[in-house]
Amino acid sequence: MKAAHYWHCFVGIQTREWLRFWQQRTRFASALVRPLLWLVVFAAGFRAVLGISIIPPYQTYITYETYIAPGLCGMIILFNSMQGALSMVYDRELGSMRVLLMSPLPRPFLLVTKLLSMGVVSVGQVYVFLLLALLVDVEPPLWGYLAVLPALVLTSLMLGALGLLIATWIKQLENFAGVMNFVIFPMFFMSSALYPLWKMNEASPWLYWICQFNPFTHAVEAIRFSLYLEWNPVAFGITSGVTVVLALLATAGFRPQRTRILGTKPA
Amino acid sequence: MTIEARNISFRYGDKPVLQEVSFALTSGCFHALLGPNGAGKSTLFGLLTRLLALQQGELLLARQSLKKQPSRAMRQIGVVFQQNALDLDLTVRQNLQYHAALHGLSRKEARVRGDRELARFELLERANEPVRKLNGGHRRRVEIARALLHEPSLLLLDEPTVGLDVASRRGLNEHVRALCDEVGLTALWATHLIEEVRQDDRVLILHEGKLLADGVGHDICKTKGTRDLAETFHTLTGAG
């Protein structure tokens, strides 16, 4: 197969993801309503309760809305990635995953392209969210919108790979709902998305360490620092490393026969 | 280009699903893989399409191991699955373009080939309609058109007439036979319906994971001492 074949395949998978996304426009709205509620309602309530001291990358005191905006960007990607994994289970049950796997191109390429396609859709949603966040005075520097792009793509890939890994081991849609509760909520709440880690450390040192080991914390910090034009090599390094490990595990561990991909049930 | 299976065995856990199955398909011919439900037809298709990993035996494509040249094999094989594998919300053309892209075809090439296949199946005027609006028979035709888009030499159809009425079943069966005659396609049509098989077809009868007969319909009947394929099928499998 030549490079052109790979390119056409890449474009085809991206196009299908956008077409599907367009067909399910309510998904777009619901994916934005959730973080906007957090930003407008939850943050307004907690603004008075949680005082934020001056912490990097911020140069001065900030509002709680400003603090949680990067975490909510991560939240959009987290929910989308899990929904993407859900769509892969759905695809598998409806058969279109079989169509993908019938391609003569290598399976790791197909799976990584699928992850990227889901990621690109998520990144688009994050930018719409950031534009809407301007209405509540979350105003990062103009160049921050561009600087944050690599962190967003990296986070999408990391969480997409996690979603794929989960989807590989899930045989039915019903089981997926349970995993959502065991993956999405712990990842989100046990991270620096809603509260700075020093505050977590004051409240509970062991919870602080769980947050430190949570890769989502580092993805959120990569987004936060990039958005404010600061470089955080630790956050980027950990997020990149976890992305590579998860992508390798997910693509190497993908076995159609683990699933009901043929409509046949293993005995 | 033909495919050959040598001593294929497969099991799900402790349950054997295929046992020492061997056959070779003849290039450019229509083949019927006849077997009752649970005979192992879908599992065999899973192995031929690499959706299942081969546990024992060998699959050869043009005398070369399919395992060693999966990319080449996938370029030569078109598949119609038992369950619908079309995206119902996308249009007919978008479904075809997606499949073409997965095979590395450009949009322009996909458009030309897609229109050709849709015209062959009398669906060109419905190209821009969502698949959801098509009836079962038309959806099946779209699936066959899609499977032919990358110009495979072997077409695998796993119970393609499930859920269709008698007229649609007959029409689809005749379409595929015509393709074998007109373009030299090799087809393997899996079914449990004896009326979809003709006496002069090359027939493979699969039952409980074992290949019980392999040959031209009349020859099998002669060997088994039966009047027709229906009686042979009933005698061998208790079905029909």
Image (cartoon, coloured by chain):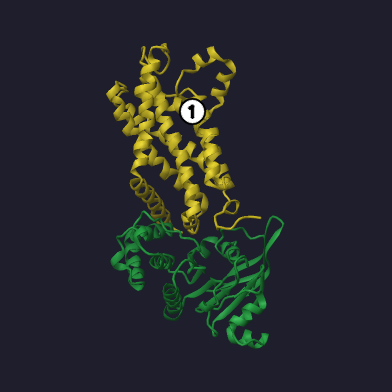
Visual hue assigned to chain B: green
Compared to residue A99, the image places residue B78 above or below, namely below
Residue A57 percent across, percent down from the top left: 40, 18
Dividing the picture into quadrants, the one containing residue B106 is bottom left
Give the chain of mark 1: A
Q: Is residue A161 left or right of residue A41?
A: right
Task: Give B63 or A169, whichever is nearer the viewer.
Answer: A169
Horizontal side of B238 relative to A12 (left or right) equals right
Q: How many marks?
A: 1
Residue at 38% across, 12% down: A48
Compared across the picture, whether A12 is left or right of A203 comes to left
Q: Quadrant of the C terminus of chain A?
A: bottom right
Say above or below: B181 vs A69. below
Q: Which chain is yellow?
A: A
Q: Residue at x 34, y 48 (%)?
A: A23
The residue under label 1 is A188
Identify residue type, mark 1: Phe
Is residue A241 in view from this perspective? no
Above/below status of A226 relative to B130: above
- Counting from the top left corner in percent of width and height, residue A244 is at 53, 38
SS state under label 1: helix
Density class for disc 1 (Cα within 10 Å; few <14, some 14-19, many ≥20) is: many
| Furthest residue toward right | B14
Residue depicted at 38% across the width and 64% down the height? B135
Measuring from the top left, give residue B240's x and y in whole percent.
Answer: 59, 75
